[in-house]
Amino acid sequence: MASPGDTITLESDTSCDDPLPDGGWIVTAAHTGSAVVLTQTTSDDQFDGSFAATLVLPADFPHGAAYAGIENWDYSFCEGAGSGSCASATGEFMVRP
C-alpha cells in the first residue's frame, strides 16, 4: 500500500541480458485501467539480480489499484522473445487515500 506523496520502489531479483537503452530504463507508474503515465524516472541499473528504481507518487495520484513498470523494455533481445521468458520488471500496488 502507498499513499499519494509516498516513494515506491520497483525491484527485480531476476538476471537478464537485455542491454541498457540509451538514456536508461524509463520507469513509470499509472492508475490501473489508464495508459496515462502519472510519474516517471530513469534508471541505469543492470538486470543482474539487484535492479531497483524509485518513483515519487504525485500528491494527486488517484486512489485504488495502480502499477509500475519499465516502458522501454526491448523483448527482441530475450531468448524465446514473445513467450514471456524475459519479462520486464512490473508490479501492481494499491494507493490509499
Image: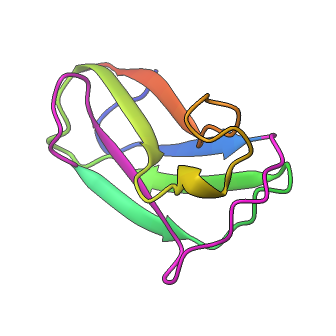
Q: Is residue 48 left or right of residue 24?
A: right
The quarter of the picture where residue 26 lies is bottom left
Question: Which quadrant, please, contains the C terminus?
Answer: top left
What residue is at 69 percent from the left and 49 percent from the top? 78
Query: Magenta part of the protein: which range?
Result: 13-37
Q: Is residue 54 left or right of residue 6?
A: right
**Residue 72 x, y percent position in the rendering:** 44, 59
What residue is at 51 percent from the left and 55 percent from the top? 73
What residue is at 68 percent from the left and 40 percent from the top? 86
Instruction: Decide which of 46, 95 is in the foreground and name it.
Output: 46
Q: Is residue 48 left or right of residue 30?
A: right
Instruction: Decide which of 66, 22 is in the foreground and name it.
Output: 22
The extreme front residue here reads 80
Does the magenta-highlighted stretch encompass residue 12?
no
Q: How many marks?
A: 0
The quarter of the picture where residue 32 lies is top left
**Residue 12 x, y percent position in the rendering:** 72, 41
Q: Is residue 71 above or below residue 93?
A: below
Q: Main secondary structure of the magenta part?
A: loop
The quarter of the picture where residue 44 lies is bottom right
**Residue 88 x, y percent position in the rendering:** 59, 43
Instruction: Decide which of 87, 90 is in the foreground and name it.
Output: 87
Does the magenta-highlighted stretch encompass residue 16?
yes
Colour scheme: rainbow
**Residue 90 x, y percent position in the rendering:** 52, 35
Q: Is residue 62 above or below residue 71?
A: above
